[in-house]
Image (tube, helix red, strand yellow):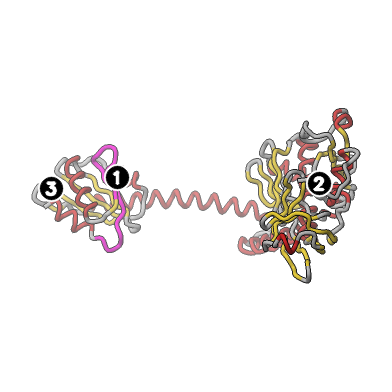
Amino acid sequence: MKTHFHPEPENLSEAIKTVNGYWVEPDTYEFKAQIDAIDGDWIHLTRNFFYPEGGGQLADAGILIMDGNNYEVLDVQNKDESVWLKLNTKLSKKQSMDSSVLAKIDESRRLDLSRNHSSQHLISAAFWEELELDTTRAEVGVNESQVELTRSPSLAEVQSTLEVIAQLITDDLPIGSTFLNKDQVRTMQYRGKIDPGLTTYRMVTIGDYDKNFCGGTHVSSTSKIQDIVINKLEGKKIRFYSGIKAKQYLQQDSIRLMELGRILSASRSKINDSVSDLVDYKKKTIREMIKLKTKIVEYQVSSSEWIDLTNYSYKFVDIEEVDSGVVIGIIGEIETNQVICTRTPSGVFIIRGNVSIIEELMTALKEKGIRGGIGKTKIVAMGRVKANDDIDTIIRQIIE
Ligand SMILES: [Zn+2]
């Protein structure tokens, strides 16, 4: 879809500058235009400064004012190298074609996106320069944004790279863009990949530090980023905030650390040691508790009496909560005419007997709505009962 009012461009570089208003006038947030095409709830304007979703950056939002009415711009997309806006209302072609509109781009959203996009360039550039980690994917959002690297960096690597980034922000390097042709691109060094099919390329530079080909929106210098905080490291993915949101995140984290210090009665520098001591202590305590519980279950199983039923000796034991494997080990070998059932406070039951009685019991229990199954050895059945299921009485009835 070509914008019909433009004269045929002399060269493509000019064409791209003309079409993408947000590149040449990144600070234009308000403009007048006419509607020259309508397609459902999508419209096309004679001039455009809205950024369409692309290159990992979310679309702009805003409003159009026409005949005193406000229309919300819900989405902006590039279709056939032309930018279309999705409105919250379908316009009638008859009434709205060639109408004049006043367009207002949501400035704070654009600034958030531009700042996060510039931060993404800075993060990608620093990880490339410091560690030769390339960026494979980037997502630029209004709040949190993310970069995916070729490998997962260590926390120490993240820390040293963040120090470099902080210096680059302090140095207030200009962030600019130029248009280059294929021959110019071929002879130069840059970060990232290019689409070999283009004739004109838009290069985004951060001082002399980084050159990268990009069609997004950016702030004009690194100090406008204010601050970058990496809030999550998920393998190769780095999630981050920038600007005031980064500062807020750091402040909240600082308060959280103070709270943690109070809970642990530890100074800030001792918090890590204190938590790691606690974790060790917890692991040790759990191991001790399992040992003790195992001893208790051994006693519970061995001290309860066998009851003689018609063909079987039977015992039912309420036991402490331990792993099923532990219980089966404690029960061990039994006589062929013996049946034993254990139940933990959470309702997990284990029945040990011979092959035929186990099958008979499990079939009958299932008929009574009790859930469970038979193990591979066919001499153990396992399941879970509800608090009001009297599994002891049911088993006795079945055996007798
Ligand atoms: Zn960019």
Give, as a single range, the part of the protein colored magenta: 372-389
Q: Which amino acid does label 1 sit on?
A: Ile
Q: Mark 2 points at which residue?
A: 165
Q: Is mark 2 on a helix, strand or loop?
A: helix
Q: In the image, residue 82 lies at what x, y percent?
A: 77, 47
Q: Name the residue under label 3.
A: 312
Give residue 46's mark: none
Q: In which quarter of the image is residue 203?
A: top right
Percent position of residue 313, x then y:
14, 49
Q: Earlier in the sequence, mark 3 or mark 1?
A: 3
- Viewer-nearest of discs 2 and 1: 2
Residue type for callout 2: Ile
Residue 382 lies in the magenta-colored region: yes
* Mark 1 Cβ inside 8 Å of ligand 1: no
What separation in Å lies between label 3 and label 1 (alpha carbons)? Answer: 20 Å
Q: Residues within 10 Å of mark 2 (few under 14, many from 20)?
A: many
Total labels: the figure holds 3
Q: Determine contact: label 2, label 1, CB under 8 Å.
A: no
Residue 368 visible to the viewer: yes
Residue wearing tag 1? 330
User: Who's the residue at 34% across and 47% down the image?
Assistant: 324
Decide which of 53, 46 is in the foreground and name it: 46
Is residue 336 positioned above or below 76 on the image?
A: above
CA gap, disc 3 and disc 2: 76 Å
Confirm or deny contact between disc 3 and disc 2 (CB under 8 A).
Answer: no
Q: Position of residue 143 (x, y in %)?
A: 71, 57
Q: What element carries label 3?
A: loop
